[in-house]
């Protein structure tokens, strides 16, 4: 609705292009999907690159839409992020990951640390610190077993307010990592002051590591930054043995990617937990 004059409102449906309408209907479908349990968390193993041993997982959201089938997050998370819906979804993700981890721990399955992705809006308006504290408490989990991944652009953008929230989370004892590292515009002095534990090297640098000398240089630089700042490292998108070999040789401890495993439903990840070694 658009305001025109004092007490008159006119609806400019004609102004809306098809794209905007599509987003609007997707948003309401998503809202309904959340309420009707159509969202799922899948898990992708994180692996110690040198030994091939499983050390945790990243939880990745999927939407099992009754007509569209399995919808990947890139098709609906950006829409959720444009509204407060991302806060409700983010709470669902935290709750679901923690409840799952509780079950695995009760079954004596060592899942390691479970990472969830957190959007900027959750940090800004979502009361993230209190939500995380309560969720851990509800499921009786120690804070070290939960990792929060926040993208580089979010971590760097929000300035002092962001640092404060990250510091509170750090005090709570959850593990914090910067996602998609290398794609934003980090100032190194700022990075040094951010209370985070680890960096995830973005997949775009790992992808052509075996054949692109620029990517080799960037990846080596990121590894050396992490080492000098005392940060842990995870490489995303490891698909080939050459990439793993390079990363191991240059001192990157952990990775995830199709070389080890694609993201999988909770039941499949549970089967994996019974074997543990991936490659
Ligand atoms: P991300 O956090 O960077 O997650 C990694 C993405 O790379 C995942 O895509 C994963 O399936 C994919 N991937 C992992 N290994 C490989 C590989 O070896 N090769 C290739 N080509 N791809 C690989 P996915 O699951 O489609 O998620 C896409 C993005 O959606 C995520 O990127 C994240 O930004 C967002 N997302 C996923 N789940 C959540 C969530 O629960 N909350 C929020 N806020 N965002 C989420
Ligand atoms: Ca991530
Ligand atoms: Ca990432
Ligand atoms: Ca990425």
Image: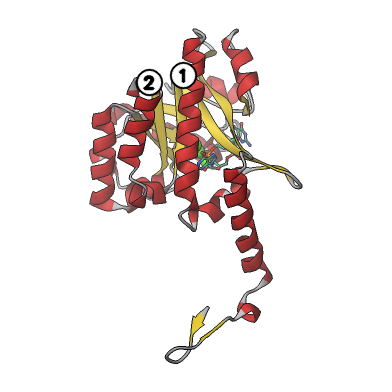
Residue 188 can be seen, yes or no: yes
Mark 2 to mark 1 CA distance (whole Å):
7 Å
Q: Which residue is identified by label 2?
A: 141
- In the rendered view, tell whether residue 45 sits above or below residue 181: above
Secondary element type, mark 1: helix
- The percent position of residue 239, horizontal first and vertical second, equals 63, 28
Q: Nearer the viewer, residue 152 or 40?
A: 40
- Label 2 residue near ligand 1, CB within 8 Å: no
Residue lying at 64% horizontally and 53% vertically, measured from the top left? 29
**Residue in the picture at 60% in, 47% down:** 74
Q: Based on the displayed image, in which of its 4 quarters is residue 257 positioned?
A: top right
Q: Residue at x 38, y 49 (%)?
A: 154
Q: Name the residue at 74% across, 47% down.
A: 68
Choose between 6 and 230: the one closer to the eye.
6
Q: Please state which of residues 59 and 27 is positioned toward the viewer in this rendering.
A: 27
Graded by Cα atoms within 10 Å as few (under 14), some (14 to 19) or many (20 or more), the crowding at tag 1 reads some
Label pair 2/1, CB-CB below 8 angstroms: yes
Quadrant that contains the C terminus = top right
Mark 1 lies on residue: 102
Instruction: Tally the numbered discs.
Output: 2
């Amino acid at each position: 609705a658009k305001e025109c004059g004092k007490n008159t409102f006119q609806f400019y449906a004609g102004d809306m292009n098809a794209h905007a309408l599509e987003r609007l209907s997707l948003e309401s479908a998503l809202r309904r999907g959340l309420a009707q349990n159509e969202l799922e968390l899948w898990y992708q193993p994180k692996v110690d690159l040198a030994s091939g041993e499983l050390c945790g997982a990243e939880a990745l959201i999927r939407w099992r839409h009754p007509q569209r089938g399995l919808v990947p997050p890139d098709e609906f998370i950006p829409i959720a992020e444009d509204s407060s819906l991302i806060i409700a979804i983010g709470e669902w993700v935290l709750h679901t990951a923690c409840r799952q981890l509780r079950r695995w721990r009760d079954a004596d399955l060592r899942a390691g640390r479970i990472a969830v992705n957190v959007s900027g809006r959750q940090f800004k308006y979502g009361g993230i610190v209190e939500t995380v504290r309560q969720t851990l408490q509800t499921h009786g989990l120690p804070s070290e077993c939960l990792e929060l991944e926040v993208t580089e652009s979010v971590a760097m953008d929000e300035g002092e307010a962001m640092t404060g929230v990250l510091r509170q989370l750090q005090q709570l004892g959850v593990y914090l990592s910067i996602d998609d590292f290398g794609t934003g515009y980090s100032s190194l002095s700022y990075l040094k002051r951010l209370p985070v534990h680890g960096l995830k090297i973005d997949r775009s640098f790992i992808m052509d590591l075996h054949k692109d000398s620029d990517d080799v240089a960037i990846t080596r630089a990121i590894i050396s930054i992490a080492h000098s700042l005392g940060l842990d490292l995870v490489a995303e998108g490891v698909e080939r043995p050459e990439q793993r070999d390079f990363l191991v040789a240059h001192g990157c401890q952990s990775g995830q990617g199709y070389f080890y495993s694609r993201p999988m439903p909770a039941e499949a990840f549970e089967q994996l937990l019974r074997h543990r070694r991936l490659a």
